[in-house]
Image (cartoon, rainbow, N blue to C red):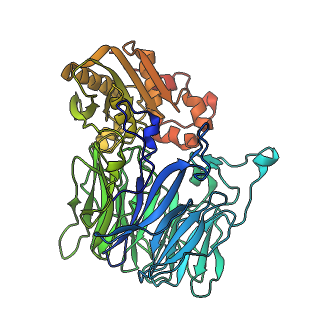
Amino acid sequence: MTLPHPSAPADARPGPDSLLPLVFPSDPQVSPDGQAAAFVLTRIEEDNPRTPDRDFPKPRYRSQIWLTDGTLTRALTQGENRDSSPRWSPDARTLAFTRKAAEGSAQLHLLPLTGGEARRLTDLRGGVGTPLWSPDGQFIAFTSTGDDEDRRDERGEARVITKPRYRFNGRDWLPDTPARLYRLHIASGELSVWHAPDLEISDVAWLPDSSGVLFVAATSELADVRRQQEVWHLPLNGERRQVTRWASAVNAVIPHPDGQHFALLGHPAGHGNTEHTHLYLLPLQGEADPLRLDAGHDHPVGNGVGGDCHVGTLPERPAWLDARTLLFSATVRGSCGLFTATLPGDGQPGTVHVHDHDSQAVIPAFTARGGGLALIRERADRFPEVVLNGTQVTDLHANLPFTARTPTRVPFPTDLGEGEGWVLLPDGTDPVPALLSIHGGPHTDYGHAFTHEFQLYAARGQAVCYSNPRGSLGYGQAWVDAIHGRWGTVDADDLLTFFDACLHTHPRLDREHTAVMGGSYGGFMTNWLTAHTTRFQAAITDRSICNLLSFGGTSDIGLRFWDDELGLNFHRRADALKPDRLTEIMRKRPR
């Protein structure tokens, strides 16, 4: 199955416009009985396809919701909108989703799967977030800023910033008033504000008996800046109650089927940005030490492997398969697969088992229930595809206007064991320029995800060398910890050792025509390497960190990142910081 789309002609030397024929999958949502799935396909087209502007085209994303039962795959919605966030009703007869027209914000719609048109349920200026059905099907919850309007920019009015957290990448200015949690009663159509928080809610999940929700939020502005979050209980009728004393990051909360416990995805207090995310079990009532469910599994929960064809929502919330088994994804070296954590019981310890893990592939999104599993799978040489219960239901790779190349693995030695990276080579036997690409994070990962950018360079005759130096995810906690407060030391050693290994094992790489490039932390390392070596003839530093002091005060994450990554305290008085302390920590180790 391919989505109809005006394809770009195949080109031996494709350019950036090779993105235009691509169709991007996202948000695979398996049905309650596990036998079907709804998902989103997104394409890029002219802002107004009826009157395209050939001289100054204005590309925009368009997305539709598709449905598959593993045999037949078809479009559920049409038009020029951005339809997204499909969510099944508990009886599987209705699909809730959001629709954003060319003008306006995303609004909640209901689509009967037995036939009929989608029905719009909201008209809020601030739009709505992802809809969440109550398990009994009576309510839909979502977050929204309601009818709040911020027109200061168009009026030319100045902004007076009074909060330390006031903007964020991809979101622009944050609203002065956090989004409220709304509740819609399906039968009556009654819409009401369920909870108006003082601080932003980052996650919400219904309890299995539909008596209320658990949500995640900080207790104060300072805790919010430091990402010290807590889990709260909000009943249908009653006041919120703080459940945890976690004081650290909470990525997701997953209520247990018994309604008396919940799984928490995060890391405990006292562990900063370098700590792997893990799974913990806690009681809803009372206090008890958290039980780590993935003990002994030295890999972070969730996908940390970067790819640039991820457009839209990629769900990876762990899911209870039964009362003792929790399904989750984890990053293992350059791959991401699915694993199960089994709770201890009957005198047996909890264990972690492989559920679906291909060491040469990445699963960036999945949902599971009713015995069914919907996911997205990709490889370094294969575009992301939707899979339902083991059957691939899309053929989006067919839209690629050039032949995808397969990278070659290149290992390199370190004090902590073998590291790895890859080389993506152009066709032929002639010498080619060599690009060393450095990922951001620094705690992310290169690996087996499809990366259009790298494929594009290789198609145009340039080799790309990319690796996971110490600090990257997927190689154990010690590998990540190795660069805490030590940027520009062992990580720089690993990058250059890997690049030397690439030059040695692939004689086609032209040593006289090399370049280094990277973004964010990769931009920092690009700056660092060009300041400490003369071996690269060109460098591209993108959204980089050039000054760690100004980064601490101006970046959207700087106020907490200093403490987490560098082991320093940005809030301390300048005269209390020893003059040589920062230099000492960041100094490059002599070679």
Residue 583 left/right relative to 151: left
At x 27%, y 26%, the residue is 498
- Residue 588, given in percent of the width and then of the height, sits at 40, 20
Give the residue drawn at x 45%, y 21%.
Answer: 539
Residue 209 sits in which quadrant? bottom left
Q: Position of residue 83 (x, y in %)?
A: 52, 63
Nearer to us in this view, 265 or 103: 103
Which of the pair 394/584 is nearer the observer? 394
Number of marks drawn: 0
Visible in this render: residue 66? yes
Q: Is residue 572 visible?
A: no
Q: Is residue 550 above or below residue 510?
A: below
Could you say where residue 40 lies in the image, as x and y percent from the top left?
Answer: 44, 61
Q: Is 186 left or right of 380, judged from the image as shown?
A: right
Locate residue 480 relative to residue 131 in the image: left or right.
left
Q: Is residue 114 above or below residue 15?
A: below
Residue name at image x 39 percent, y 16 percent:
536
Q: Which quarter of the image is occupied by the N terminus? A: bottom left
**Residue 188: x %, y % from top left:** 62, 87
At x 63%, y 57%, the residue is: 102
Q: Identify the image quadrant of residue 103.
A: bottom right
Quadrant in which the C terminus appears: top left
